[in-house]
Amino acid sequence: METRAGEPPFSYGTLQSEAVQLATFGRRLDGKPDALPGYRLEQLAIHDARVVATSGAARHPIAVPSGDTADFVHGTVFHLTPQELTQADDYEVDDSRRAAAGLAPGLRAWMYVRVE
């Protein structure tokens, strides 16, 4: 799925935390609830001390395809500037990457998935 640079990110994990938002973007983000069909959450061990310090957690949720369209990952679609999207990329760990996603109501967004 092709996604344009201006499309919003979908967060189901620590980017929803106000503390992470303030540390990463210097502001609270505006967003709305949404869901990602065909995925489930697993836990990813975080080895980056900076990310652990920012999030307060050594394990973060990571979305993985489930192969079952009845599965949904619930989260938030945020409004970020292109610079803030780069800041989100910098916050994410090397074990994840940004990828295109199709959300429940047909909206396309960016999300972070496990690097295989």
Image (tube, helix red, strand yellow):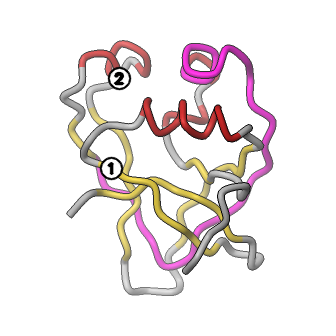
- Mark 1 lies on residue: 96
Image side of residue 93 versus residue 79, left or right: left
Q: Nearer the viewer, residue 56 or 84?
A: 84
Q: Secondary structure at mark 2?
A: helix
Callout 1 environment at 10 Å: few (<14), some (14 to 19), or many (20+)? some
Characterize the local packing of mark 2: few (<14), some (14-19) or many (20 or more) Cα atoms within 10 angstroms: some
Instruction: Say which quarter of the image contains residue 54.
Output: top left
Q: Tell me which amino acid carries mark 1.
A: Ser
The quadrant where residue 109 appears: bottom right
| First reached walking from the N terminus: tag 1 or tag 2 | 2
Q: Which residues are magenta?
A: 20-43
Q: Residue at x 58, y 48 (%)?
A: 11
Q: Quadrant of the N terminus?
A: bottom right
The image shows residue 61, relative to residue 88, as above or below, that is below
Q: Residue 56, relative to residue 82: is it above or below?
A: above
Q: Quadrant of the C terminus?
A: bottom left
Location of mark 2 (residue): 51
CA separation, marks 1 and 2? 13 Å
**Percent of width and height locating residue 60:** 35, 39
Tell me what residue is drawn at x 31 percent, y 37 percent: 93
Is residue 48 a member of the stretch shown in magenta?
A: no
Position of 24 with respect to 97 (left or right) is right
- Assign a secondary structure to mark 1: strand
Residue 14, above or below 53 = below
* Residue 22 painted magenta: yes
